[in-house]
Amino acid sequence: MDSIIYTMVRLADWQAAEAAGAYHGSADDRRDGFLHFSAAAQLRASAARHRAGEAGLLLVAVRVTALGEALRWEPASSRPGLFPHLYGALPLSAVRAATPLPLGPDGTHAFPAEIP
């Protein structure tokens, strides 16, 4: 089974990606020079830190093997551990799923069951 990494994408940005055939990242991604991803175990903390209370997001699941050498696991400047960074556009062919990431009643994101 292919390993999966995740990114949280605003709906308008994802619609633009679908029209273009690739996702070129958020304004933060473009500023940093790479697309930010998280492993499943990192995702809840990433959402709390970078997308707290933000509605209208999609959870985009991506197959690691489809990204090749453009994917690098690197330290984050603000948190321990290695995080997946994609240096280049995300081809839509690498995407396993893009599903809504709603906010729960407590204002935190309601992740699917497979996210620890």
Image: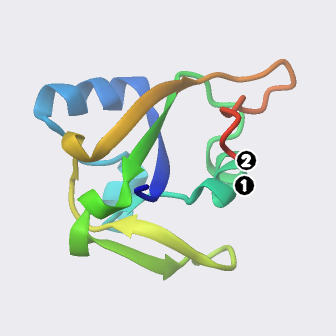
Q: Residue at x 44, y 39 (%)?
A: 60
Q: Image quadrant for the N terminus?
A: bottom left
Q: Residue at x 21, y 54 (%)?
A: 89
Secondary element at image label 1: helix
Residue reaching furthest right?
Answer: 106
Secondary element at image label 2: helix
Residue 109 spot, x, y in % from top left: 71, 32
Residue 96 spot, x, y in % from top left: 36, 39
Please rate how many residues cluster around mark 1, counting C-alpha atoms within 10 Å: few if below 14, some from 14 to 19, many from 20.
few
Do the residues bearing badges 1 and 2 touch, measured as CB atoms within 8 Å? yes
Q: Please determine whether, in this image, residue 22 is positioned above or below residue 19.
A: below
Q: Please determine whether, in this image, residue 69 is positioned above or below residue 51.
A: below
Kind of residue indicated by mark 2: Ala
User: Residue 17's image quarter?
Assistant: top left
Report if residue 95 is visible in the image.
Answer: yes
Residue reaching furthest top?
Answer: 105
Q: Residue at x 71, y 23 (%)?
A: 103
Please rate how many residues cluster around mark 2, counting C-alpha atoms within 10 Å: few if below 14, some from 14 to 19, many from 20.
few
* Residue at numbered disc 1: 45
Q: Exactly how many numbered labels are in the figure?
A: 2
Residue 28 spot, x, y in % from top left: 42, 54
* Residue at numbered disc 2: 48
User: Residue 34's image quarter?
Assistant: bottom left
Residue 110 spot, x, y in % from top left: 72, 29
Disc ID at residue 90: none
User: Residue 85's image quarter?
Assistant: bottom left
